[in-house]
Image (spheres, rainbow, N blue to C red):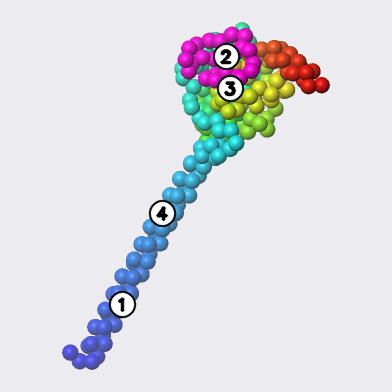
């Protein structure tokens, strides 16, 4: 083989190697982009679910059972007016209450659940009598509500007692699901086991609050 032919063959070989490297580089960029995009999408979906768990008091999303919804509606049957579900999740309590004539609202930290609740309310034909808000319950005011529903956890119930007692009107009723309030005395209850709901009269816990304040004066 002449020197000229050898040079041509070497040049073609180097060109093939360079092209192979460029192909692998492009493939690496594509794979990196796909993996990076997937991680960003996963974080966008997961972050709203994880973030509430990082807060001082965690209120996880556990859908209400059919029996729990029925028990809430049963104890509120004589009632009317405004209603708020604290930690409204997928909106099933709010939607069911709206179908029974309440002007119902839901407070929920998870924006995905809020958007889904709004869609469900629209699909069920009660979007005009419902509203869902991305809201931290500790920053919200409950002064305008005559009925409150809460699916809480034990770690938050004592703090929530104080907040509701200070903000709710004396005509209000509070329905606690799964866990009762630690010091309030319920006027009635409905259901059994995890489906039990407890009903509290604001006039009663207002009186208790005033007595406790008088003791410390």
| Residue 51 on the magenta segment | no
Q: Residues within 10 Å of mark 2 (few under 14, many from 20)?
A: many
Q: Which residues are magenta?
A: 177-199
Query: Which one is closest to the eye, mark 2 or mark 1?
Result: 2
166 and 141: which is toward the camera? 166
Disc 2 secondary structure class = strand
Q: CA distance from mark 2 to mark 1?
A: 79 Å
Task: Say left or right for 169 vs 118.
Answer: right
Q: Earlier in the sequence, mark 1 or mark 3?
A: 1
Contact (CB < 8 A) between labels 3 and 4?
A: no
Residue 60 spot, x, y in % from top left: 52, 31
- The residue indicated by pointer 3 is 150
| Residue 185 on the magenta segment | yes
The disc placed on residue 15 is: 1
Q: Earlier in the sequence, mark 3 or mark 4?
A: 4
Q: Earlier in the sequence, mark 2 or mark 3?
A: 3
Disc 1 secondary structure class = helix
- The residue indicated by pointer 2 is 198
Query: Which one is closest to the eye, mark 3 or mark 4?
Result: 3
Q: CA distance from mark 4 to mark 2?
A: 51 Å
Contact (CB < 8 A) between labels 1 and 4?
A: no
Contact (CB < 8 A) between labels 2 and 1?
A: no
């Amino acid at each position: 083989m002449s020197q000229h032919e050898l040079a041509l063959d070497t040049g073609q070989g180097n060109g093939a190697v360079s092209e192979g490297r460029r192909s692998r580089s492009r493939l690496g960029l594509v794979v990196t982009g796909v993996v990076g995009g997937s991680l960003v999408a996963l974080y966008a979906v997961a972050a709203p679910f994880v973030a509430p768990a990082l807060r001082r008091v965690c209120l996880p999303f556990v859908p209400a059972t059919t029996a729990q919804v029925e028990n809430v509606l049963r104890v509120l049957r004589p009632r009317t007016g405004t209603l708020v579900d604290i930690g409204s999740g997928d909106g099933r309590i709010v939607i069911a209450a709206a179908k029974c004539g309440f002007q119902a609202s839901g407070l929920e930290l998870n924006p995905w659940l809020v958007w889904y609740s709004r869609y469900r309310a629209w699909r069920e034909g009660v979007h005009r009598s419902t509203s869902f808000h991305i809201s931290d319950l500790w920053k919200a005011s409950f002064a305008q509500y005559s009925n409150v529903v809460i699916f809480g956890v034990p770690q938050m119930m004592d703090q929530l007692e104080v907040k509701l007692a200070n903000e709710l009107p004396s005509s209000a009723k509070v329905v606690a699901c799964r866990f009762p309030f630690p010091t309030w005395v319920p006027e009635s209850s409905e259901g059994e086991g995890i489906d039990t709901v407890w009903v509290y009269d604001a006039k009663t816990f207002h009186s208790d609050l005033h007595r406790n304040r008088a003791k410390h004066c």
